[in-house]
Amino acid sequence: MSTTQTLEFQAETRHLLQLVIHSVYSNKDVFLRELISNASDALDKLRMEAFRDKDLQVDTDDPHIGVTIDAQARTLTVRDNGIGMNRDEVVALIGTIAKSGTSELLRQWKEAAESSAPDLIGQFGVGFYATFMVADKVTLVTRRAGESQATRWESDGQGTYTIEDLDDAPQGTSVTLHLKAVDEQDGLFDYADDRKIREIVKRYSDFVSWPVRLDVQRETAEGETVHEVDTLNSQTALWARPKGEVTKEEYDEFYKSIAHDWSDPLETITMKGEGTFEYEALLFIPSHAPHDLFMRDGRTGIRLYVKRVMIMDECDVLPEYLRFVKGIVDARDLSLNVSREILQQDRQIQLVRRRLTRKVLGTINSMLAADDGRYTTFWREFGRALKEGLLSDVDNRQEILEVISVASTRDPLQTTTLRGYIERMQEGQQEIYYMTGTSRALVEKSPHLEAFRDKGLEVLLLTDPVDEVWTDSISEFDGHKLQSIAKGQVDLGSGDSEDDAKPSREEFGDLLSWMGSVLTEQVKEVRLSQRLTTSPACIVGDDFDMSRTLEQMYRAMGQ
Ligand code: ADP
Ligand code: MG
């Protein structure tokens, strides 16, 4: 049965399409990168599925990406013989935007001036929908590997799409663009011109590991149609080439294609392991956080290859707190059908994981040292994720502490590193003072701060919920004790003059024991203190007590 259904795009998708169609995003060429990267992913997935399930009736013969131009009809088709999609998947993946960043993109778009739309597209990426920058109608025909029913999807990007069953179609997906009229002023080049297509593929997709073949049809003078087939990409794995021979642009394009990002990465990391276990790694620190950074359970951004063949995505070769890092690891001596479970226990892989982790932390440290703004961007985007590592990665605590930034009483606008704090410590000061709380404003009002402010002692203000937890389990950095100013006895040094002014225990003894007896239900002890200058009293925790905020957190949870 072949039913044609006309369906409406989900509201968000409609908005996004409007944004794409009316955008003046100058670099419209990238639509082809998006299509080729989807096709390449589909071929990777097919290969992985075929490995996993040997009985699967799929065609893995001559996997490739084909590009066909029909200059007469002004259409451009990109097809792959990869995994394909069934009808439900087409509706879910193409008719709907499931990308978690989309609503954020649209929110920002509404808030921002019209003119910044191109930047937003560049920042969020629009994947498949980028085709509507250059086409006024897009037709997708697909058949999932192992299934017999094919599906045809078509849309002009204006609000609805049609979907129908097809009895027959080759395995995989083909996407045909009915090209808009050429308008070079508007960045719309002639995408039915094979020279333009060759140039774009070379520029954006040269390293794609599957062949991208161009099939040009031409009418000869005698009215015959002739075909010419050319492989457009060199397919050389970027990580296999010596670092000095790869340009920054090539690395950036590679990053964009594997990370589904439209912006350049902040930092590129290459690594090579030799000896008993050989591997190459090419990692990237993105320049902005994905919108699901705190919603992704344990997924990493690393793809695992074995001798240039991708065998697993979201692979566990980096700890979870570094989940924002994207890239690939190519290991020479792994089995092609290694499972996630086996990988987790593999000692060599654990070793690679430790090395990559250190390398990433070292790279963050050198961005910090370079002091050229990249670290500031890094910290804004990924700082909170990185701090999780203080709890989960006990081995690298000191390295992580080395690169974290925190607010401090020194400057309301600037954060500081712990090292920076130590460099500014006063003569004789041994401890790193900090105070935790739920907001900077609240912490700053705290009477605990008075004496420190008075003596010009800098105090770190830690107001992230995770700060409560790590400060609880980490006691020192670089030989200096981390001291909460709201806990225990804080020795503020004893200048002589102050000793004279010290209120004496005898003088206030009666008052203290009276207060202690009145407050016996509420406090353990009432003490004289030098911490305060203007407030008459404050509540202090014992060294090993839960901090006030943590206590409140537990209370709120009903414990
Ligand atoms: P992304 O690639 O970032 O996931 P896209 O908008 O490019 O976003 O594609 C959305 C989804 O549609 C893909 O994740 C994939 O599941 C599916 N898809 C797109 N193109 C193909 C294709 N050629 N073959 C199989 N699935 C595809
Ligand atoms: Mg894509």
Image (cartoon, rainbow, N blue to C red):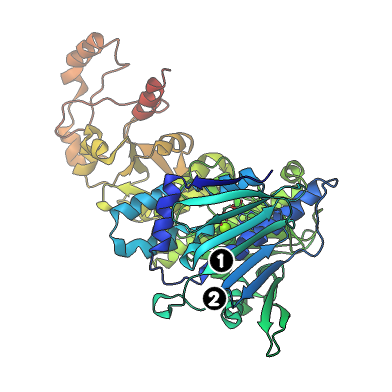
The residue drawn where x is 42% and y is 62% is 21
**484 displayed left or right of 346:** left
**526 displayed left or right of 318:** left
Label 1, on which residue? 177
- Point out which mark residue 434 bears: none
The residue drawn where x is 77% and y is 58% is 277
Amino acid type, callout 1: Leu
Residue 296 spot, x, y in % from top left: 54, 42
**Residue closest to the eye, 223 or 349:** 223
The residue drawn where x is 18% and y is 13% is 510
Pick whichever of labels 2 and 1 is earlier in the sequence: 1
The kind of secondary structure element at disc 1 is strand
Residue 200: quarter of image: bottom right
Q: Is residue 359 above or below residue 443?
A: below
Q: Is residue 293 above or below residue 77?
A: above
Asked whether residue 531 appears in the rendered view, the answer is no
Amino acid type, callout 2: Tyr
The kind of secondary structure element at disc 2 is loop
Q: Quadrant of ligand 1?
A: bottom right
Label 2, on which residue? 191
Residue 540 spot, x, y in % from top left: 30, 26
| Quadrant location of the N terminus in the rendered image | top right
Circle 2/circle 1 CB separation < 8 Å = yes
